[in-house]
Image (cartoon, rainbow, N blue to C red):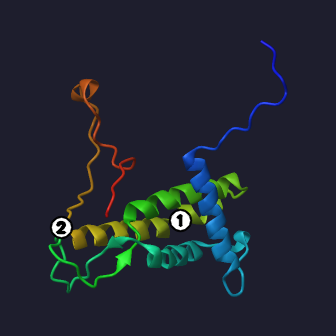
Amino acid sequence: MESSGSEPPVTPSRYESQKRRDWNTFGQYLRNQRPPVPMSHCSCNHVLDFLRYLDQFGKTKVHVPGCMFYGQPEPPAPCTCPLRQAWGSLDALIGRLRAAYEENGGSPETNPFASGAIRVYLREVRECQAKARGIPYKKKKKKKPTTEMAGGRDDSSSSSSSFSFS
């Protein structure tokens, strides 16, 4: 089989395309700051500000504690509570930006997307949204390997689960 040197370009996966878009959007956000922030000076505080900025474009209704629908997963009527970014969307976004940072020359030790402050923020968003929707989220305890898992599914991995708040 002969190889002709002109193979068609490989189309990036949906994940890779989204990661590039997210990286470009974050870079634009930093450039729009006054004064503009170079990526080399980006800190977890810039990332937190970016996540808060994104809330204005959210589509997830998050009931405030005074709302009569607070804690109800399916409220029977509309209310004036704000729309926010869903926790799952923010969590996935941070994962993509964390990877993009290192792919674009950043070191893992200085990755602002891997900061403990970001993990705390995401945990608080998840808990707040869960309470507002009446969805209990309890941290799953890691199961010790047993013979039960050999034939079944391992439910101990909550980090790869995808939750959607709509």
Query: Which residue is painted at 19% across and 66% down in the image?
Result: 73
**Quarter holding residue 19:** bottom right
Q: Give the CA separation, mark 2 to mark 1.
A: 34 Å
Q: Which residue is mark 1?
A: 115
Asked if residue 141 is positioned above or below residue 2 in the image, the reply reads: below
Give the x, y percent position of residue 65. 22, 82
Query: Which residue is painted at 45% across and 79% down in the image?
Result: 56
Q: Which residue is mark 2?
A: 74
Q: Check if mark 2's residue and mark 1's residue have beta carbons within 8 Å.
A: no
**Quarter holding residue 165:** bottom left
Q: Would residue 165 be found to the left or right of residue 30 on screen?
A: left
Q: Classify mark 2: residues with Cα within 10 Å, few (<14), some (14-19) or many (20+).
A: few
Q: Amino acid at mark 2?
A: Glu
Image quarter where the C terminus lies is bottom left
Using the image as rendered, state which of residue 155 and residue 9 is in the foreground.
9
**Quarter holding residue 129:** bottom left
Give the x, y percent position of residue 136. 20, 62
Image quarter where the N terminus lies is top right
Q: Would residue 166 be found to the left or right of residue 7 on screen?
A: left
N-term-proximal mark, 2 vs 1 = 2
Give the x, y percent position of residue 52. 48, 78
User: Which tag is nearer the camera, tag 2 or tag 1?
Assistant: 2
Helix, strand or loop status at disc 2: loop
Using the image as rendered, state which of residue 22 and residue 110 is in the foreground.
22
Q: Amino acid at mark 1?
A: Ser
